[in-house]
Image: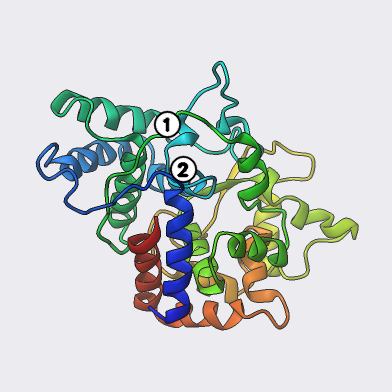
Amino acid sequence: MSSSQLLAAALFLAAVLGGSNAQLSATFYDTSCPNISSIVQGIIEQAQNSDVRINAKLIRLHFHDCFVDGCDGSILLDNADGIASEKDASPNINSVDGFSVVDDIKTALENVCPGVVSCADILAIASQISVSLAGGPTWQVLFGRRDSTTAYQAGANSDIPTPLETLEQITQKFTNKGLDSTDLVALSGAHTFGRAQCRTFSHRLYDFNNSSSPDPTIDATYLQTLQGTCPQDGDGTVVANLDPSTPNGFDNDYFTNLQNNRGLLQTDQELFSTTGADTIAIVNQFASSQSEFFDAFAHLFDCVI
């Protein structure tokens, strides 16, 4: 990892730990709950049998938690007195999912080590296991996060990147968290699996930027496929694969898709199609070397999330 990445990691680590003064450690549960990884993996493997998207859902859930006031499990809180749930924020409502599997994991852990493992740590280990099960890299998860008793819905609305934003807007949100362009491209690579609803990208198919024409950066054949999946004025909740080539596997096809103008979301394709952007070289780097993408992705999660 470069010095700039280490600095970014240190800044983001400070952000995600917030004021808790938590000391994270890989051995945090070695005595109190030594089988946490195997228990979590068993639940996720079982969930895969009925939901091929669960791996992508769990890592997205973790990211949307961490990007707002740190990795504190606040995204799991429901509406209550004094709590406006982050689940109801614009980037999350009817979009973020996987809560029932987190509940199943929590129940299983409570059965063997009651009152020990935080929900924030469950999100962290579930993300690592989800990526690994899908064929992606692994990393050492550090434990010891504390669960928040408050939510920050306004922060979720303002901080979490949305698929309708420009590269400049997304980059600024990452910069605000102490993250650089390599971090942005590596984290965007999580779109190598999972699905997105038509409502998040249909503006690119028919009336991009009020032009009455499709986004010119979309490959013509891919455009026809997407228009078939998402007809104009159709059901916006229908989903399409974020990675049309290997939709359920964690690999570097996401980046070759961008090179071929087959990025599904506006925020995906702009990483490669924005003239003069420093993200273009990083996309090319990860497209040519899956191991470099895996290393960047794992190092980021290993160090900061």
Question: Distance of mark 2 from mark 1, alpha carbons?
Answer: 8 Å
Secondary structure, mark 2, is helix
In what quadrant of the picture does the N terminus appear?
Answer: bottom left
Residue 273 percent location from the top left of the image: 69, 75
Instruction: From the top left corner, tell me how far across and down residue 206 is, in percent.
Output: 81, 54
| Camera-nearest residue between 99 and 179 | 179
Q: Which mark is residue 290?
A: none
Q: How is the image coloured?
A: rainbow
Q: Is residue 145 above or below residue 248?
A: above
Q: Position of residue 19 (x, y in %)?
A: 45, 46
- Residue under the image location 49 percent in, 35 percent down: 75
Quadrant of the rendered image containing residue 216? bottom right
**Relative to residue 63, is residue 172 depicted above or below?**
below
The quarter holding residue 184 reads bottom right
Q: Secondary structure at mark 1?
A: helix
Q: Which residue position is annotated with label 1?
A: 99
**Can you tell which quarter of the image residue 267 is in?**
bottom right
| Residue pictured at 61% horizontal, 49% vertical | 160
- Badges 2 and 1: C-beta atoms under 8 Å apart? yes
Nearest the eye: 290 or 4: 4
Say whether residue 133 is visible. yes
Disc 2 designates what residue?
61
Within 10 Å of the Cα at label 1, are there few (<14), some (14-19), or many (20+) other Cα atoms?
some
Amino acid identity at mark 1: Phe
Quadrant placement of the C terminus: bottom left
